[in-house]
Every structure is written in structure tokens, then in C-alpha cells.
Amino acid sequence: MNVLITSASRKVGLIKAFQRALAEEDGGQVIAIDANPRSAALYFADKGYIVPSGLDQDFLTAVQNICQEHDIRLLIPTRDEELPFFAALRESFEHVGVTIMVPEQGVVRICQDKHLFINFCLEHGFLVPKTYEIPRGIPKFPVFVKERFGKGSKWAFRVETASELDNLLLRLKDPIIQEYIEAPEYTVDLFADFSGLVLSVVPRERLSVFGGESFIGRTCKNWDIIQEAIQLAQALGLVGHNTIQCFWHEGRVKFIEVNPRYGGGAHLGFAAGAFTPRMLVRLILGKEVKPCIGEFEDRYYMLRYTEDLFLREQELKQSERFHQSGAI
């Protein structure tokens, strides 16, 4: 079987992980696409394609043609903006034999709207950081302010004073104000089959974060976090690989957000024993995948670093020319 990974960008590790997963099963190729010919991951995939930017009909046509030409069985969106786009197309792709790793549209909407996510958690008995009304009802500072539809750390701020908050609120479109929590922050890599059965859960403590991504982390076999994450996934209806953010605060789990896609630090879970790319490939092939919750190495560290890819100008110019015809 062949796998298509969208918005490949710098996700070389994910490309290699699926190449390994396919090699360990029945074989196949990893096809990568991106709008930028200078995306490093395109040069590590078995085949790379430059596709139109945006999420319009030209982009969709390019993806459909690539799926048909390469007999794609599994499509993996990796960018937040793509998730609602592909969620709306799940059934149409399934009709031509392509499974998209994305939950239903309503699930994506809850995960990407922080206000909806907070309300969902409270209605279903899950804890979240205390959320304050704007502009009143703030008992003490500092507070944490973020955009309702923001992502990463770009629109997230620690605010120390009321005057600082007033100035910030003038700049934000739809802010959410929450208590500032000084507690260990965790990313939970949770994998479920396409019926929603949770098969693997790996919490990892975020020891060093840059730009919203974890660069130093360690696995942690905290069973409270594991069980709470399973219950949240079942309540939401998550499928495939998901990235769940939470605090471990005063002996309780407080959820921050869910990204229903692979995250940048997911490779720590792979290395610790929860190799979800192979699980996903086996599901698509119709093979048995048994739950392995808790079957990972505890206190296993990840130290991420940058690796360079060197290309001659002639090679880059060649990739630019292929922007017209397609393949790298």
C-alpha cells in the first residue's frame, strides 16, 4: 500500500517513520506533497510533488490525481488548516479506496475552537484551567491569555497586570482568559482505531518548548493521565493519532487542547515502543492491532535537534521548474 502525507514541510521524521512502517509490513511508498519546493521532507519521500497552495479546487484536484496515480490507500493531513477541509471529504475519498486519518467534522470543530473545547470538557466532567469572563471576574494575576482560534505559542501570553491585560485585549480578536498554572505540562500521544477504540496512550512531559513544539521531553507512565486521556478520546470520538495537551496540577489532569493529527514530538512515543505508524498501516491492511496501553518505556528522553540538507542551486532550480509539471 502507498501513503500520502500532506504539507510535508520539515516533517522528515514522519516520512521516515511511515517508510519504516511500510517496510515492516507488505511494503509500499510514501508520497509527500507541499506547496513549497524548498520543503526538506519532499526530498526524503519516495516521491514528492509540488501542489497548489491553499485549499481550493486546484489543490483538491492535484491531491485526487496523485491518489489515483499512486494507488494511495492512506492520506495523512499534518496541518491544522487542512483538518476541516479533509474531514468534509472523508466519505468521498473512502468511495475511491482512500482512508483519511481525520475524525468527523464536528470533532475537528470542537478541537480547533478553544471555547467549544472548554465547554465540551466541562459538560462531560473533564477539568480545564479556570476560565474567566472578559473583562471582569479575574481574582488574581498572572493570567494566561490566548486566541480562541490560535495555534502554537504565537497568540498565547502570560499577563501580569490588569493594565497589561487591557492593552492586550485591544489587539486580540476573540481572546480566552484562564488561570496561569505553574505545573508540569504534558503531551499525550493517543492512538485509536477508526471505530474509536483506543489502542495506545503515551504521556510525555514537555521539559523544553520552543514555538509551541516540545524539543526536550520524556515519557511518563502516569496512569491518571492515561485513563483521563482515554475517556476524553472516547467522549470526543477521536480516531487515528492525536496530540492531547494537559497539565498535571495538584494531582489532577487539566486539559488544554486536542490536535487530531501527528505532532512534532510524536517520535518520542514511537521510540519508546508505541509505533503508531505501523499500527495505522496494519489497520488499513485489515490486520489485527491489539491494544497496547501502557506498553512503552517509562522515563525515556527525547532531545530534538536540527539536521541540515544540502542541495546545489541547480537541484533547487530543477525543483522549481517541476512546479509546472508536478513531480520532483
Image (cartoon, rainbow, N blue to C red):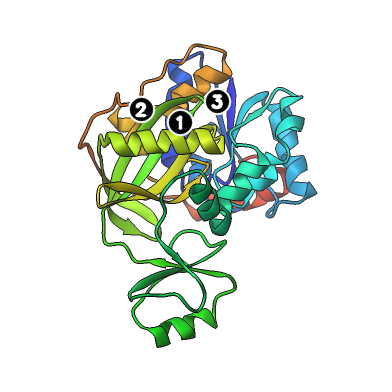
Query: Which residue is at a point 54% across and 80% down the rendered structure image?
Result: 171
Q: Position of residue 22 (x, y in %)?
A: 48, 21
Of mark 3 and mark 1, the one earlier in the sequence is 3
Measured in 3D between alpha carbons, the distance from the residue under mark 2 to the one under mark 3, in whole angstroms, is: 22 Å
Label ID, residue 191: 1
Q: How many marks?
A: 3
Query: Which residue is at a point 45% across and 19% down the rendered structure image?
Result: 23
Measured in 3D between alpha carbons, the distance from the residue under mark 3 to the one under mark 1, in whole angstroms, is: 22 Å
Q: Position of residue 320 (x, y in %)?
A: 63, 53
- Rendered-image quadrant of the N terminus: top right
Q: Position of residue 247 (x, y in %)?
A: 33, 51
Front residue of 316/306: it is: 306
Secondary structure under the numbered disc 2 in the rendered image = loop
Secondary structure under the numbered disc 3 in the rendered image = loop
Which residue lies under the disc numbered 3?
29
Q: Is residue 69 left or right of residue 166?
A: right
Q: Of the residues shown, which amino acid type is indicated by label 1? A: Phe
Mark nearest the camera among 2 and 3 is 2
Front residue of 106/128: it is: 128
Q: Is residue 16 visible?
A: no
